[in-house]
Amino acid sequence: MEPYAPEVIEGPNHYLVVDGLINGNGITTVKLSRTQNISEESMPMAEMGATLLLEEEQGAQYPLYETDPAMYVSNSLNLDHTKKYRLYIRLSTGREYVSDFVDVKQTPPIEKVSWEALDNSLQIYVSSRDPQNNTQYYRWEYEDTWAYTAALYSNIKYDEATGTIVARGRGDENIYNCWRSDSSKDIKLGTSAKLSQDVIHEYPILTLRALSEELRIKYSILVKQYALTQEAYQYWEALRKNTEGIGTLFDPLPAQLTGNVHSLANPDEPVIGYVGASSVQEKRIFVSRDELPKEWRYFYPTCQMDSLLPAEGETLADLAVRFKGGNYMPVTEIYPPQGGIAPIGYMGATKRCVDCRTRGTNVKPDFWE
């Protein structure tokens, strides 16, 4: 058996990608980018300098502002749920695009976010119901945050003012207790269309390994729920299959994405994206270390060590210069209390092992209990 590497089809086209949702009870956020070939290793091209308007059918217009490159946000809005809305886009080149007018779906509250400790993992579920049977199609996103500590504790630092290594004090920046956040990458969809009641019971939204860093101290997840129309659900389901269900002989073939964003000058121009409209419901839970099985509570962070042994004739001042470069951060005594050259065997750690800011932040989130 010989491996088969099919020829990858490439083209010169970079189609517009519209990623966003009209938020009926808050801030609308839209990201504009361009498609790229599979072989391209760079980040997708950002579409900056555009003008975006949220338009009410035969009514008001609400501008979106570019707060970050290619990221456009509105003010917090409370839209009229009896009217229809669309998104208008005018690129810096003058080309214009609009989405179809859509109703603002009312999203029912999240009934419960729960978790279960299985053999080797923590499974997180979301449950919801609509007593009016008006939803039937759901999409979820999440943002998770967890506390952790650096692998090693640093009790000395490099002093820029004096160019020397000094002891850390109580007023120094905290680089040991850390928090890190992440967001969902997969497309999470659910439907009750084939059920007698509009109920979603314990949909598995996330799985965490038993001894993962996230569960070492304290973990939090914020789940966001969106009600979809049947057309929006079909778009997201096709997108999910195209991006997550490809790779084996038994996976479905990629499907043509049919969104609801169109070019005003050329209706045949492909545009990627479906701009729906709905209210958003949220629910947050916390999972503490003490709530987990005892055998899960042992987590030993690892840290790759690099030797900081001074070269022959090198002084402490020379060693301090090496810390100044930012490649190393002292994590323990590297020289005897009496001063002098560090003895054989004294070690230091790379900066990424001890500084919270390399992977997260040392600022405690406002919502943290």
Image (cartoon, rainbow, N blue to C red):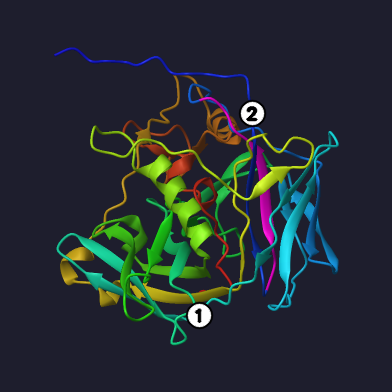
Can you give x and y, in whole percent of width and height, for residue 340 in the image?
47, 35
Magenta-highlighted residues? 26-37
Q: Is residue 346 magenta?
A: no
Can you give x and y, in whole percent of width and height, for residue 56 in the image?
79, 67
Left or right placement of residue 208 versus residue 131 in this view: left
Left or right placement of residue 220 versus residue 345 in this view: right
Along the polypeptide, which appears first: circle 1 or circle 2? 2
Q: How many marks?
A: 2
Can you give x and y, in whole percent of width and height, for residue 72 in the image?
73, 53
Give the quarter of the figure containing the N terminus. Answer: top left
Q: Residue at x 49, y 81 (%)?
A: 109
- SS of the residue under disc 2: loop
Give the residue furthest to the front: 267
**Image height of 287 relative to 213, above or below:** below
Residue 122 quadrant: bottom left
Residue closest to the eye, 327 or 5: 5
Residue closest to the eye, 154 or 72: 72
Residue closest to the eye, 168 or 5: 5
Residue 159 in view here: yes
Tag 2: residue type? His
Residue 350 quadrant: top left
Name the residue tied to disc 2.
Answer: 14
Tag 1: residue type? Pro
Name the residue tied to disc 1.
Answer: 108
Give the residue furthest to the top: 2
Residue closest to the eye, 348 or 277: 277
Residue 293 - label: none
Q: Answer few, some or many: residues within 10 Å of disc 1's Cα (few below 14, many 20 plus, some between 14 and 19).
A: many
Give the residue furthest to the bottom: 131
Mark pair 1, 2: CA separation: 38 Å
